[in-house]
């Protein structure tokens, strides 16, 4: 039947594809018959390579490295290097007579000597020991000319607030604004005229007074009288 023929042809195609894409077990050597490959199944070169590898470790010694520095040794080396580096420090002294030019670290300091002729005591002269001799290398002072004084800041704030109204001024302005307006207490209603029906309503926007006018009288239930059936029949007799 056609169905059997198509199934058989399809099976032949699949077998051909499998043979083309995958090698037979006998074609891949002795390893083809093993479920797992052990070191013993490898060549001597591969065995030596695997046996000589380093296992995972957390230290250099664990990898067989013997000439590496530890973290503690690195920190100590850095501290020693910094300590041996020449660096300058600033020292405040009252006069040049207080400077020891033959001290071991004399050439590693900048000496700040106060200058009596300075402005407001903020001027200093800088000295350094160079080749065993004291040399003046410059002057230094605190420059506060670009900073505002407390009185100047206070004056600037007061000047900036001149354009703003004070609380008392605002309150006064509100009271003056509402002085001519009608207050809630001014509202009232007055009724005039006869009757029980409001026929007109007037409002005075100057005084806040409402005036209601009664012009007619409407009938109420009391004004109506019940008519009996006998009275209705009598009308048509």
Image (spheres, rainbow, N blue to C red):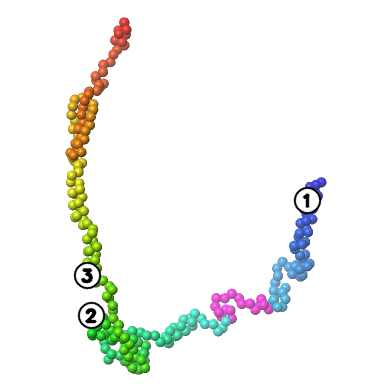
Give the quarter of the image for residue 220.
top left
Classify mark 3: residues with Cα within 10 Å, few (<14), some (14-19) or many (20+): few
Mark 2 and mark 3: Cα distance apart in space: 18 Å
Quarter residue 227 falls in: top left
Query: Which comes sooner in the sequence, label 2 or label 3?
Result: 2
| Residue with the mark numbered 1 | 7
Q: Could you tell which of marks 3 and 1 lies nearer the N-terminus?
A: 1
**Left of 17 or right of it: where is 159?**
left
Examine the rendering and report whether any part of residue 76 can be seen.
no
The residue positioned 77% from the left and 64% from the top of the image is 24
Q: Residue at x 70, y 68 (%)?
A: 36
Is residue 212 placed above or below 206 in the rendered structure?
A: above
Q: Give the label, 3 or 1, closer to the camera.
A: 3
Magenta residue check for 60: yes
- Which range of residues does the magenta coloring cover? 48-64
- Taking depth in this image into account, of 211 and 224 the one nearest to the observer is 211
CB within 8 Å, label 1 to label 2: no
> Which residue is labeled 2 in the image?
120
Rendered location of residue 94, percent (x, y)? 26, 87
Which mark is in front, 1 or 2?
2
At mark 2, the secondary structure is: helix
- The first of marks 1 and 2 along the sequence is 1
Quadrant in the picture for the C terminus: top left
Alpha carbon of mark 3 to alpha carbon of mark 1: how far? 106 Å
The picture places residue 158, in percent across and down from the top left corner, at: 22, 64
Q: Residue under circle 3? A: 151
SS type, badge 1: helix
Mark 2 Cα-neighbour bin, 10 Å: few <14, some 14–19, many ≥20: few
Q: CA distance from mark 1 to mark 2?
A: 111 Å
């Amino acid at each position: 039947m056609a169905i059997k023929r198509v199934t058989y042809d399809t099976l032949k195609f699949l077998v051909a594809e499998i043979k083309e894409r995958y090698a037979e077990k006998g074609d891949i050597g002795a390893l083809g018959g093993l479920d797992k490959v052990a070191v013993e199944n490898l060549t001597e070169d591969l065995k030596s390579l695997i046996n000589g590898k380093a296992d995972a470790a957390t230290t250099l010694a664990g990898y067989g490295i013997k000439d590496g520095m530890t973290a503690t040794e690195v920190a100590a080396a850095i501290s020693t290097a910094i300590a041996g580096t020449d660096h300058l420090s600033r020292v405040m002294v009252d006069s040049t007579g207080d400077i020891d030019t033959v001290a071991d670290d004399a050439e590693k300091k900048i000496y700040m000597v106060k200058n009596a002729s300075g402005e407001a005591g903020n001027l200093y002269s800088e000295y350094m020991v160079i080749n065993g001799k004291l040399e003046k290398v410059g002057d230094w002072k605190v420059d506060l000319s670009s900073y505002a004084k407390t009185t100047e800041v206070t004056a600037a704030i007061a000047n900036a607030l001149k354009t703003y109204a004070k609380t008392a001024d605002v309150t006064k302005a509100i009271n003056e604004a509402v002085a001519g307006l009608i207050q809630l207490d001014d509202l009232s209603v007055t009724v005039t005229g006869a009757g029980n029906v409001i026929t007109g309503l007037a409002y005075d926007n100057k005084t806040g007074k409402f005036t209601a006018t009664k012009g007619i009288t409407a009938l109420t239930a009391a004004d109506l009288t019940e008519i009996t059936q006998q009275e209705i029949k009598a009308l048509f007799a």
